[in-house]
């Protein structure tokens, strides 16, 4: 989404949740993700001089961005090149409600918001394909070899069925899902988590291959459970997926503690979401009332933040 007024343009993007299939998706297996309503916003206007960026972690010229944010400067430069405006002075303000490094797709959302705002500033509307390829620059920097699931989910308004190199399709979900997200407060490092899975694969290929195949089967069964609206089956599939993520070596004590707390307080199933090794968990609640209880119990168990989210109504409750 973008808006434009008086030499200033605003681009927005939402975050995402991976329901099942993270990590296996890097190996070409299918995964399911959905939009999550926390948003990133980029506000751009023309200035004299060079390109300046203002954000919660850095403010200054984009030529001096810290290493961790270099993906965003490459993405901005690539977009300006594509738009034939490389020599313009710009002030870009990032205003994001998506916590960083928590598996909610903050880096892709910030990049999408910037690309949308720049396109709008120069009177252009990018196709999904153009957006995808420009944002991919930032994601490659942040993740090394991203599957592209974050971008695909954040460019969609509906849950998606994603497989690397194949057309992404929208999923028909029969019933409203109540999902509680619990934030460990620790930033995960997706690049390291993906590298760890690769190392584990190299040292025990049989075990990791089996796990990846099991995750692919879980994704297929999850798609069927969503179409049927079978919440109990969906809960057990999340639990099965978490078991495999533990085998891959991307869960940790903090995540496991939140997962157990959510199940003990009535969740039908729970797992980490995104890269892992910190970040967030998701828990499936049978209804909103239980979702509120799970949210509170997650905070008691050490989560720094928790959101109860409904696929039909957006964020309903924030703790
Ligand atoms: O950006 P994150 O932390 O949500 O992780 C993306 C999902 C992974 O499968 C771990 C990586 C990828 O590129 O698909």
Image (tube, grey):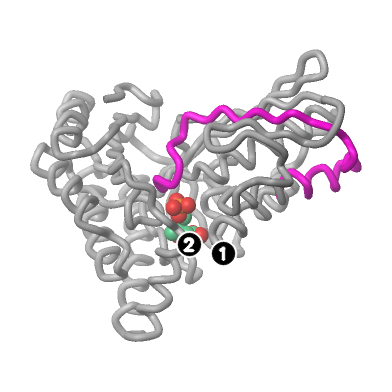
Q: Which segment did they paint magenta?
A: 75-103
Residue 161 spot, x, y in % from top left: 48, 52
CA gap, disc 1 and disc 2: 6 Å
Report the side of 7 relative to 206 (left or right): right
Q: Are marks 1 and 2 in contact (CB under 8 Å)?
A: yes
Mark 2 neighbour class, 10 Å CA radius: few under 14, some 14 to 19, many 20 or more:
some
For residue 179, the mark is: none
According to the picture, the residue beneath numbered tag 1 turns out to be 144
Query: What residue is shown at x 37% (from left), y 60% (from top)?
Result: 220
Q: Secondary structure at mark 2?
A: helix
Badge 1 or badge 2: first in the primary sequence:
1
Report the side of 3 relative to 308 (left or right): right
Q: Is residue 80 magenta?
A: yes
Query: What residue is shown at x 22% (from left), y 63% (from top)?
Result: 243
Give the farthest residue toward the top: 6
For residue 191, the mark is: 2
Image quarter where the N terminus lies is top right
Query: What residue is shown at x 12% (from left), y 38% (from top)?
Result: 266
Mark 1 neighbour class, 10 Å CA radius: few under 14, some 14 to 19, many 20 or more:
some
């Amino acid at each position: 989404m973008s808006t434009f007024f008086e030499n200033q343009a605003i681009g927005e993007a939402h975050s995402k949740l991976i329901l099942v299939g993270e990590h296996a998706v890097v190996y070409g297996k299918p995964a399911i993700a959905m939009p999550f309503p926390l948003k990133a916003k980029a506000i751009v206007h023309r200035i004299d001089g060079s390109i300046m960026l203002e954000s919660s972690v850095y403010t200054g010229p984009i030529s001096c961005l810290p290493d961790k944010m270099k993906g965003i400067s490459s993405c901005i430069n690539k977009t300006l090149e594509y738009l034939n405006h490389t020599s313009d002075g710009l002030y870009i303000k990032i205003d994001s409600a998506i916590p960083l490094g928590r598996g909610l797709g903050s880096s892709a959302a910030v990049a999408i918001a910037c690309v949308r705002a720049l396109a709008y500033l120069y009177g252009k509307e990018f196709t999904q394909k153009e957006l995808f390829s420009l944002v991919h620059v930032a994601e490659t920097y942040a993740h090394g070899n991203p599957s592209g699931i974050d971008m695909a989910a954040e460019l969609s308004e509906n849950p998606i069925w994603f497989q690397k190199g194949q057309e992404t399709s929208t999923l028909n979900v029969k019933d409203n899902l109540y999902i509680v997200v619990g934030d460990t407060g620790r930033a995960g490092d997706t690049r390291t988590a993906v590298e760890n899975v690769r190392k584990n694969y190299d040292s025990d290929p049989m075990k990791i291959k089996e796990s990846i195949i099991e995750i692919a089967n879980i994704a297929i069964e999850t798609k069927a459970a969503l179409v049927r609206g079978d919440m109990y089956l969906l809960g057990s599939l999340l639990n099965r997926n978490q078991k495999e993520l533990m085998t891959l070596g991307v869960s940790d004590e903090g995540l496991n503690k939140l997962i157990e707390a959510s199940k003990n307080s009535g969740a039908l199933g729970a797992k980490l979401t995104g890269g892992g090794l910190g970040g967030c968990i998701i828990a499936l609640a049978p209804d909103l009332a239980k979702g509120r209880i799970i949210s509170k119990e997650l905070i008691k168990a050490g989560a720094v933040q928790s959101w109860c989210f409904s696929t039909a109504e957006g964020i309903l409750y924030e703790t």
